[in-house]
Amino acid sequence: KIKSTMISFIFILFVHLFSATSAESNCFKLTDDNISLIGNNLTIKGNGTICDCHFDELEHYRKTIQTIQFEQSVTTIGKKCFEQFTSLTSIEFGKGISQIKEGAFYNTKISQITIPKNIQKIEQLAFAGNDLVNFIGVPIAGLDSYRMAVDSGDVHMLMSGLAAPAKVNPW
């Protein structure tokens, strides 16, 4: 019985590692081959999904880049790719982008942004740690809490209903 459990465990581990490797191989890393820099403006030129990033990637750009432009061929911005870009104030999304992953623009100086219709999913904390969140997240949560209080008729209601994802209208 121990032998069959061990074989099952090894099989599950193999399947998990193989699927993670396959998913990772379908993305591109940010390297000098797929980025161009003109002044303080960075253009991303790769095809498909940007791989999830680690803090040391693009380290030499973190304090100088002010604008990032994504070409049409980029479809997904990986986790934490542009976190701590402390001079970043502007992003131009290409028409190909459909997803922005967790923490992609965490702790930047972005104060204004236009989210195109083609972006279907923005993961949690994608824009956390900057003033942009205060202008978007706080008013939406306030409006949601007001609507919940009115709907419930209970002025002493708890805010636990705000734990669910915010629902916004796609304009």
Image (tube, rainbow, N blue to C red):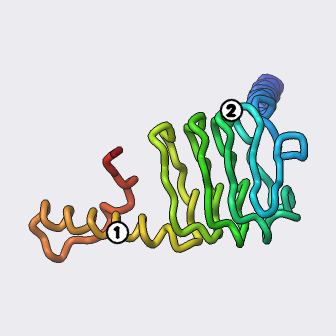
Residue behind mark 1: 139
Where is residue 121 drawn, in percent x and y?
50, 43
Q: Disc 1 residue type?
A: Pro
Nearer to the camera, 143 or 18: 143
Residue drawn at point x = 68 percent, y = 49 percent: 69
Where is residue 128 drawn, in percent x and y?
56, 66
Q: Residues within 10 Å of mark 2 (few under 14, many from 20)?
A: some
Dividing the picture into quadrants, the one containing residue 96 is: top right
Residue drawn at point x = 61 percent, y = 48 percent: 101
* Label 1 with label 2: CB-CB less than 8 Å: no
Where is residue 140 drawn, in percent x and y?
34, 63
**Does residue 51 lie above or below 73 as drawn?**
below
In the drawing, does residue 82 fall left or right of residue 18? left
**Which label lies toward us, 1 or 2?**
2
Nearer to the camera, 7 or 132: 132
Element at badge 1?
Answer: helix
Dividing the picture into quadrants, the one containing residue 73 is: top right
Locate the N terminus by quadrant.
Answer: top right
Locate the C terminus by quadrant.
Answer: top left
Residue behind mark 2: 73
Residue drawn at point x = 83 percent, y = 25 percent: 3
